[in-house]
Image (cartoon, rainbow, N blue to C red):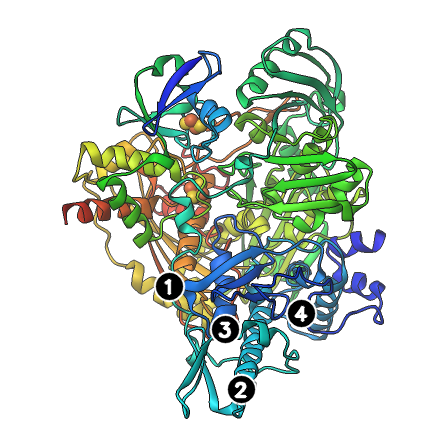
């Protein structure tokens, strides 16, 4: 039994230590907003925040997470998240939406660390998140927009 | 059965004839044939719309949402005629059984006619195929960029009809002439007396009004929603984790199944040692399934948790009987396609003038051979499906493009009647044609059969998804152009060879192979608007063991590349500007001409091009492809780095899709289509050696990422023509536009995909 802190709540899980966080979230815990895309840290669909840092949950064993704050798309909140969701809505970014939980988690982590990212910063922070629907141009626009909203 | 195969096999007219006249139902697509579920607080006004006492307007979706935005566009068409308050619009997915939800556009679009030939035979065949589509079971399908055009008429009629019923109900209640009442924003108003009532208040009495005998649809100037860049209706659910894809289904007590399918094409299961796996935590059962509906034989582990199933499967020792394709190589097969063109032309899709004569008289001839590889769809959400089979009844939760086919195919596996199969359609995490296949849900039914009534979610890993796709067919094409003694283009000949998707998919769906010509092999080659003095376009179907499927834009995905690249070769030979050559050949098509001229303007065609910040030279390339009824022109701005990497900086796109129901979502689809096509143009290639697909995951099958994503500018030409397809037409022009720019930059003509400089 490991106790994880997920979205501000202590959750006891039965999975073995080596189980990647992704499968614990999607299985036992029942938080399906975090997606499976590749299982090899290649696509970013499974991105969550661990102590505020964007992390690929598909390769993160739960044994490494005791005492850490895990945030998933379901628990993503605060001024940066609000600005990002507002920008995503205004630019109408999403298509199939499957990659978007991961995109939002990566974008929020970027804006937390860097409130005014330029295009190169966006390339750096977002290139680990694949979108087969090709929402990249709108994601780029939306990140700039979110920065603007946040700035007020 | 034969009849249906023939129909789907491409010669629809005759198939429709066999269906017979007397059996054809009346023309209306308003009332469901089966009684609709009685919902007292949400009465139905027809088969497409319910109005709730709380004012919600619930619109029935006969098509599935996979990112293409069709749900929003469909709802807008009905809501506009209904004068509904857009904020109150809700959606429900149609049940797959009722034929009013059949797709009537898909089969006619598959007829092998030239789109500009609207002669008797084409019109007659269209009409008959449409009629037949009303009658055939299982035609609730989403594909072929057909949703909006399929529903353009019935959804507007349903909205208009419901509006008349609401008006009639209000007039009756107020005892005033219906002509004095008007509607707006989900309200009926009687201006003279100052009375008004919400649709919600009128819903029950409106639902008891007779179905209007006829309706008059709005003229475009009266549209309130159609033509507006509204936001995607389901977007909010995709921003907070609540959107439910197939893989997110969590039924009570559900178990998870992971599969390893036979890695060799057409191979069989031989033996396994599952003793270690069986002892692992959470494991419930280890067993095998047989090949069915395109799903290869598989070893399956069912476990309590998904990770347990994945781990235990790795511990199973499996031996496969590799079968007759153990030495199959895609490279050798592609070589054999070229050889087959030495022997035979195959089916002639289009011929005008006398090509042979023009070629023999030509003072100059140019020839080129083009090759394109197999491609995987790689939808972001891997294949999955959840099935519960309990007490002779099945519940299926599936992210599928072919809901109409699910009940029969699942029932066959389970040995029950298809009316014992219930289907819940989820959102699809991408489709691109992959989810037109039945393999994954048939396999999930096979697996659920072993689970003693417990629901099981079968989910594929990325590797399984990549290696057991139905691939875009590889193709080899030989083109030849002739020039007369005045130096003018006098002949255009295109011959190509590859596998037929339609023949295969008919077999996977119905059990015996399709036959006849397959229009999807040659679209993009024979159906262009170019007026060649003489031309002949043929395609030869060469059967092969690789499973092939419909891949976003289908035949156009490669024939568009081939035609539009060779067009540039002809322009180079003529020493003519490639855009000007196209304009000259399209002189009789004003829509194409206007579009190309606008594209030239918007992209700065012919203007000097400033190098990027890196100082590397850039060039433009142009391509134009009409697919699914929409005309799309693109100009790509490209540079080639010192390491020969091709980089696309900007794509300018001008399109004509008839009425753009929602310009915002049309733009989205074009951006999407361009990036999808660019991934394939720069990187996409599935290779098979020793009968095994070599690619595994996103490290060896590369999609475009943010840092390589070009700036995209899209402009929509104004049009009041009926809407045409938009989910796919953004894809075909990008590969040739990039290749043509690379030629301008480097002088190298790249005749195979993915594009790689020597
Ligand atoms: S699933 Fe974790 S990065 Fe793809
Ligand atoms: S929105 Fe579909 S994969 Fe990104």
Query: In the image, are marks 4 and 1 on the same chain?
Result: yes
For mark 4, give the secondary structure.
Answer: loop
Could you give the CA–CA distance between mark 2 and mark 1, rounded to whole angstroms? 34 Å
For mark 3, give the secondary structure.
Answer: helix
Q: Chain of mark 1?
A: B
Give the residue pinned by disc 4.
B29
Please determine whether, in this image, residue A17 is positioned above or below residue B201: above
Could you give the CA–CA distance between mark 3 and mark 4, rounded to whole angstroms? 26 Å
Residues marked 4 and 1 touching at CB (< 8 Å)? no
Residue B201 is marked as 3
- Give the x, y percent position of residue A110: 24, 34
Q: Within 8 Å: ligand 2 and the Cβ of disc 2?
A: no
Disc 1 or 3, which lies upstream in sequence?
3
Residues marked 4 and 2 touching at CB (< 8 Å)? no
Kindly identify the residue that appears in the image at 47 percent across and 55 percent down.
Answer: B69
Residue B171 is marked as 2
For mark 2, give the secondary structure.
Answer: helix
Does B37 sit left or right of B492 as displayed?
Answer: right
Q: Chain of mark 4?
A: B
Q: How many marks?
A: 4
């Amino acid at each position: 039994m490991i106790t994880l802190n997920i979205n501000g709540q202590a959750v006891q899980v039965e999975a073995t230590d080596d189980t990647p966080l992704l499968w614990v979230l999607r299985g036992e815990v029942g938080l399906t907003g975090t997606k499976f895309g590749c299982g090899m840290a290649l696509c970013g669909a499974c991105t969550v925040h661990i102590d505020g840092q964007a992390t690929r949950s598909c390769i993160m064993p739960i044994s490494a997470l005791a005492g850490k704050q895990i945030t998933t798309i379901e628990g993503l909140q605060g001024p940066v998240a609000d600005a990002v969701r507002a920008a995503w809505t205004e630019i109408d970014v999403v298509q199939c939406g499957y990659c978007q939980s991961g995109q939002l988690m990566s974008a929020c982590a970027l804006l937390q660390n860097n409130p005014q990212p330029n295009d190169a910063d966006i390339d750096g922070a977002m290139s680990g998140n694949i979108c087969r629907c090709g929402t990249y141009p709108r994601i780029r626009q939306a990140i700039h927009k979110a920065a603007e909203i946040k700035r007020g | 059965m034969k009849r249906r195969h023939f129909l789907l096999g491409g010669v629809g007219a005759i198939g429709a004839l066999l269906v017979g006249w007397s059996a054809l139902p009346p023309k209306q697509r308003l009332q469901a044939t089966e009684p609709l579920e009685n919902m007292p607080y949400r009465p139905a006004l027809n088969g497409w719309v319910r109005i709730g006492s709380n004012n919600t307007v619930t619109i029935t979706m006969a098509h599935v949402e996979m990112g293409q935005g069709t749900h929003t566009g469909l709802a807008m068409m009905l809501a506009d005629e209904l004068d509904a308050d857009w904020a109150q619009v809700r959606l429900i997915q149609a049940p797959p059984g009722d034929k009013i939800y059949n797709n009537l556009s898909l089969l006619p679009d598959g007829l092998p006619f030239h789109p500009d030939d609207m002669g008797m035979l084409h019109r007659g065949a269209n009409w008959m195929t449409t009629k037949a589509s009303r009658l055939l079971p299982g035609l609730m399908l989403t594909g072929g960029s057909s949703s909006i055009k399929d529903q353009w008429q019935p959804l507007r009629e349903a909205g208009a009809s419901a509006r008349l019923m609401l008006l009639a109900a209000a007039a009756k209640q107020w005892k005033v002439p219906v002509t004095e009442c008007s509607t707006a924003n989900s309200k009926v108003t009687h201006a003279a007396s100052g009375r008004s009532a919400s649709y919600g208040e009128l819903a029950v009495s409106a639902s008891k009004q007779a179905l209007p005998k006829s309706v008059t649809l709005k003229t475009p100037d009266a549209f309130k929603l159609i033509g507006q860049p509204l936001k995607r209706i389901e977007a909010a659910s995709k921003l907070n984790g609540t959107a439910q894809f197939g893989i997110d289904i969590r039924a009570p007590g559900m178990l998870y199944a992971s599969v390893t399918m036979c890695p060799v094409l057409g191979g069989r299961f031989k033996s396994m040692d599952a003793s270690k796996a069986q002892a692992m935590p959470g494991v419930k059962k280890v067993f095998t399934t047989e090949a069915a509906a395109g799903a290869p034989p598989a070893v399956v582990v069912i476990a309590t948790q998904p990770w347990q199933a994945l781990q235990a499967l790795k511990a199973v020792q499996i031996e496969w009987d590799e079968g007759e394709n153990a030495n199959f190589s895609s490279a050798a097969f592609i070589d054999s396609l070229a050889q087959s063109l030495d022997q035979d032309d195959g089916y002639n899709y289009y011929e005008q003038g006398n090509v042979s004569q023009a070629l023999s008289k030509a003072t100059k001839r140019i020839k080129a051979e083009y090759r394109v590889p197999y491609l995987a769809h790689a939808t972001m959400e891997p294949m999955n499906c959840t099935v519960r089979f309990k007490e002779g009844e099945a519940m299926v939760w599936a992210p599928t493009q072919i809901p109409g086919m699910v009940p029969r195919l699942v029932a066959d596996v389970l040995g029950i009647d298809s009316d014992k199969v219930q289907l819940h359609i989820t959102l699809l995490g991408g489709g691109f044609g992959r989810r037109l296949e039945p393999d994954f849900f048939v396999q999930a039914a096979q697996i659920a059969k072993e689970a003693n009534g417990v629901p099981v979610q079968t989910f594929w890993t990325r590797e399984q998804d990549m290696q057991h796709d139905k691939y875009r067919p590889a193709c080899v094409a030989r083109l030849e152009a002739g020039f007369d003694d005045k130096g003018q283009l006098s002949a255009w000949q295109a011959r190509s060879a590859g596998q037929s998707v339609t023949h295969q998919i008919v077999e996977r769906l119905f059990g015996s192979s399709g036959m006849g010509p397959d229009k999807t092999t040659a679209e993009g080659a024979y159906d262009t608007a170019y007026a060649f003095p003489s031309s002949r376009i043929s395609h030869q179907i060469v059967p092969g063991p690789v499973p092939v499927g419909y891949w976003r834009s289908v035949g156009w995905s490669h024939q568009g590349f081939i035609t539009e690249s060779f067009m540039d070769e002809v322009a180079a030979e003529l020493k003519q500007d490639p855009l000007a050559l196209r304009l000259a050949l399209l002189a009789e098509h004003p829509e194409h001409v206007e579009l190309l001229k606008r594209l030239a303007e918007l992209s700065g065609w012919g203007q000097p091009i400033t190098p990027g910040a890196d100082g590397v030279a850039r060039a433009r390339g142009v391509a134009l492809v009409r697919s699914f009824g929409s005309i799309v022109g693109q100009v790509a701005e490209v540079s080639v780095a010192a390491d020969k990497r091709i980089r696309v900086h900007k794509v300018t796109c001008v399109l004509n899709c008839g009425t753009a129901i929602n310009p915002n979502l049309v733009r989205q689809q074009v951006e999407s289509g361009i990036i999808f096509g660019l991934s394939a143009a720069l990187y996409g290639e599935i290779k098979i050696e020793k009968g095994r697909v070599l690619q595994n995951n996103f490290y060896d099958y590369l999609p475009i990422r943010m840092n390589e994503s070009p700036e995209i500018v899209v402009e929509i030409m104004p049009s009041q023509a009926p809407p045409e397809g938009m989910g796919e037409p953004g894809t075909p022009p990008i590969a040739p536009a990039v290749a043509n720019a690379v030629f301008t930059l480097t002088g190298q003509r790249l005749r195979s995909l993915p594009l790689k400089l020597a």
